[in-house]
Amino acid sequence: MTIKTLRNIEEIRSCVNRWRSKGARTALVPTMGGLHEGHLSLVRHARGVADHVVVSLFVNPTQFNNKADLEKYPRNEESDRSKLADLDVDVLFAPDAEEMYPKGFTTEVTVAGASDILCGKHRPGHFDGVATIVTKLFLQTGADVACFGEKDFQQLSLVRRLVQDLNIPIEIAGVPTVREKDGLAMSSRNVRLSATARKTAPKLNATLVKARNAILEGQKISVVCKTAIASLEEAGFSKVDYLELRAEDDLDELKTLDRPARLLAAAWIGDVRLIDNIIANKVPD
Ligand code: PAF
């Protein structure tokens, strides 16, 4: 089925308004394209919680702190559209850069605190770019619910904070990470992994699982995290940005496992940066 594509803010706003005037609920799935099974699971989730589904496709330049990463980001609207074809998506909202950031644009949304830890510490400005673009998408579409993957757990947590702080009337749904058979979290960046790097990449998840089990056995958290970082480096990761235990709700650093928690990591293989996280306070069913 050919998906209706809108490129203009007024068009998407009046389309969602029309649906709302008939009592229908709209779900937004924000993406930057490079769609994979993880995105498709967000779309399926969206389908289950709303009457209409809008997928946005915009490679947001302001969230790339690294120019080369922005240039290498996969862009193929036709391929993305074909992946969505059987998922009953009502509208693909694919604005261009001028529509989103017209001449004279100066406003930036910052979620203080949440932007400077974990990935934010290593990607200055990244979360300001994310916060700004998702705020714009929420206001432009007027969607009732927006679906985000738990793979970008810090992003999900920051979006929840900003929606609460700015009283934006939208529900935020977190959707579990989709993994390859060998445990690698699906990501648009995985296509950039060489054959050797692809073999190393699942060790990120395996190391998190091993570290989580050691924490659940009662081993000291700081020692577990240090050991896990060393084992990633030994496995072939060129650099580990962080591997830390944080509280599920506010991402506070945890020294003891006294509340629901996530173990989160970011590590490089060559020039590809991978992130992953798992629930840390229990082994999921
Ligand atoms: O997760 C992403 O793909 C992006 O950060 C998002 C939410 C689409 C904003 O550009």
Image (cartoon, rainbow, N blue to C red):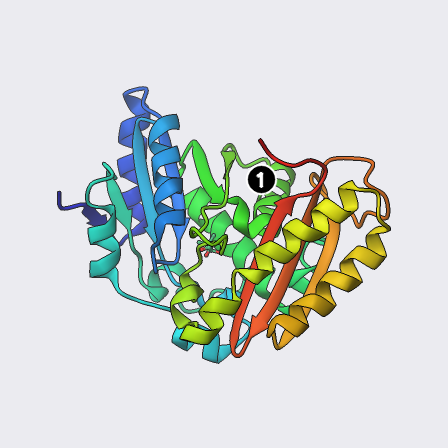
Image position of 79 (left or right of 211): left
Seen at 49% across and 33% down, the residue is: 170
- Residue that label 1 marks: 163
Q: Is residue 273 placed above or below 55 in the rendered structure?
A: below
**In this picture, is 93 found above or below 106?**
above
Q: Which quadrant would residue 239 be assigned to in this image?
A: bottom right
Q: Is residue 232 left or right of residue 168?
A: right
The residue positioned 71% from the left and 54% from the top of the image is 112
From the viewer's side, name the closer residue of 283 and 135.
283
Image quarter of the N terminus: top left
Asked if residue 117 shows in the view, the reply is no
Residue 124, image x, y percentages: 64, 69
- Given residues 20 and 127, the one toward you in this image is 127
**Residue 143 image offset from top left, x and y in percent:** 40, 36
Query: Which image quadrant for residue 59?
Result: bottom left
Q: Residue furthest top?
A: 23
- Residue depicted at 79% across the width and 42% down the height: 217
Question: In front here: 14 or 190?
Answer: 190
